[in-house]
Image: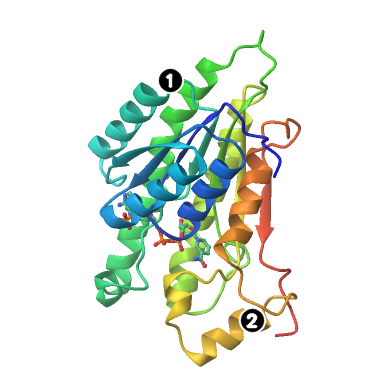
C-alpha cells in the first residue's frame, strides 16, 4: 500500500466505532505515525481501535471528550496539539447516535436537539478553533503542502428524505456541509477543507434494521449493496491525501451512485 501519509499526525473524532474506526485504521495503514483516537463513552471500542493502530505501527493517543460541551472541545484541542505538535489531518466524524441504544426512545425534539448539540454546534465550534491552529502551523517554506480537514455529511441532506429521519438528519447534515464549504473559503491555501457525504452505510443501525430498510439501502445504490465503513474511509483518505493539493471546498457523495428508479 502507498504510504501517502508517512511521517504525519492525525486526529479522528468519534473513532471508537464505525466509520471513525475504519478511517483511523486506514490512515495508519497509509503511514500516519501518531493518531488521536477520540471517543465520548465507548472506552472498550476506543481501546480496540488503538490496538489495531498499534499492530500497524501507528502510535495511538486516546482522548475522551464530549464534543457537545465547551470543556470537552477544549480538552480535545489541548490534548491533540499537546501530544501531536503538528497536525496534518483532522477528521470531524463524531456524530450522535439517535437511532440505536437508549437515545432511540427519545422523541423527535430530543433527538433533534442531541444531533444539533453534537453534530452541528460541536463540529462547528471545535473545528473553527482547530482550523485556526492548523492554519497557524502552516509553513510556506516547507514542501509538505497544506493541512487537511474532512467533515462527514449525508448524501440525501440537500435534496431531502421523507419521515422523521429525513427531517432530523437532513437539516443537521446540511448545516455541517454548508459550514465546511464556508470554512474552506477562509482556509485556503493553507488548509484544505472537504466533506464526504455517505449514503447508506452498514453500521450499527444497518446491522439491525428491518427487511424494508435493508431492501431500500441496497436498492437505492446503483452498486446494489450497502456501503461499508471502508468505502467511506477510502474516500476520506482521498480527500485528506497530502498530495491532493488542488482539492478543497468539495462535497463528495459516496453512496454507490443514488438509484433514482427505486
Ligand atoms: N452510518 C451511516 O449510514 C452514516 C450515513 C451518513 C453519515 N453518517 C455520519 O458518519 C459519522 C459516523 O457515523 P457512524 O455510523 O460510524 O456512527 P457511530 O458508530 O455511532 O460512531 C459515532 C462516534 O461519535 C462519537 N460521539 C457520539 N456522541 C458524541 C459526543 N457527544 N461527543 C463526542 N463524540 C461523540 C461516538 O463516541 P462513543 O460511542 O465513544 O460515545 C462514536 O465514536 C456520524 O457523523 C454520522 O452521522 C453515517
Q: Nearer the viewer, mark 1 or mark 2?
A: 1
| Figure check: 130 above or below 97 | above
Q: Where is residue 233 shown, x and y percent of the image? A: 59, 53
> In the depicted view, which residue is nearer to us: 168 or 28?
28
Identify the image quadrant of the N terminus. top right
- Pointer 1 local density, CA inside 10 Å: few below 14, some 14–19, many at least 20: few
- Pointer 2 local density, CA inside 10 Å: few below 14, some 14–19, many at least 20: some
Quarter residue 35 falls in:
top left
Residue 14 showing in the rendered view: no
Task: Name the mark on residue 168.
Answer: none
Element on which disc 1 rests? loop
At horizontal 71% and vertical 68% (from top left) the residue drawn is 256
At horizontal 64% and vertical 81% (from top left) the residue drawn is 218
| Figure check: 139 above or below 157 | above
Instruction: Tell me if 65 is positioned left or right of 11 in this view.
Output: left
Whether ligand 1 has any atom under 8 Å from the Cβ at mark 2 is answered as no
Of callouts 1 and 2, the N-terminal one: 1
Element on which disc 2 rests? helix
| Figure check: 113 above or below 134 | below
Task: Name the mark on residue 85.
Answer: 1
Q: Where is residue 21 shown, x and y percent of the image? A: 46, 53
Compute the Cα span from label 1 to label 2. 43 Å
Residue at mark 2: 218
Quarter residue 121 falls in:
top left
> In the depicted view, which residue is nearer to us: 155 or 41?
41
Query: CB of mark 1 within 8 Å of CB of mark 2?
Result: no
Residue 125 showing in the rendered view: yes
Amino acid at each position: 500500500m502507498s504510504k501517502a501519509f508517512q511521517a504525519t499526525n492525525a486526529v479522528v473524532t468519534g473513532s471508537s466505532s464505525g466509520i471513525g474506526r475504519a478511517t483511523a485504521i486506514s490512515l495508519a495503514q497509509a503511514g500516519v505515525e501518531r493518531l488521536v483516537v477520540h471517543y465520548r463513552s465507548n472506552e472498550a471500542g476506543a481501546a480496540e481501535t488503538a490496538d489495531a493502530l498499534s499492530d500497524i505501527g501507528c502510535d495511538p493517543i486516546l482522548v475522551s471528550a464530549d464534543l457537545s460541551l465547551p470543556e470537552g472541545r477544549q480538552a480535545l484541542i489541548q490534548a491533540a496539539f499537546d501530544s501531536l505538535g503538528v497536525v496534518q489531518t483532522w477528521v470531524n466524524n463524531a456524530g450522535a447516535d439517535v437511532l440505536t441504544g437508549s437515545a432511540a426512545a427519545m422523541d423527535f425534539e430530543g433527538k433533534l436537539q442531541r444531533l444539533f448539540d453534537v453534530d452541528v454546534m460541536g463540529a462547528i465550534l471545535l473545528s473553527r478553533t482547530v482550523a485556526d491552529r492548523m492554519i497557524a502551523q502552516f509553513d510556506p517554506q516547507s514542501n509538505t503542502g497544506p493541512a487537511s480537514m474532512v467533515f462527514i455529511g449525508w448524501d440525501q441532506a440537500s435534496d431531502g428524505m421523507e419521515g422523521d429521519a429525513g427531517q432530523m438528519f437532513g437539516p443537521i447534515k446540511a448545516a455541517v456541509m454548508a459550514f465546511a464549504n464556508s470554512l474552506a473559503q477562509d482556509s485556503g491555501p493553507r488548509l484544505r477543507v472537504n466533506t464526504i457525504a455517505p449514503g447508506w452505510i452498514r453500521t450499527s443501525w444497518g446491522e439491525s434494521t428491518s427487511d424494508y430498510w435493508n431492501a431500500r439501502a441496497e436498492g437505492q445504490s446503483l452498486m446494489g449493496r450497502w456501503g461499508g465503513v471502508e468505502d467511506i474511509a477510502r474516500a476520506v483518505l482521498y480527500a485528506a491525501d497530502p498530495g491532493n493539493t488542488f482539492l478543497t471546498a468539495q462535497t463528495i457523495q459516496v453512496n454507490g451512485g443514488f438509484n433514482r428508479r427505486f
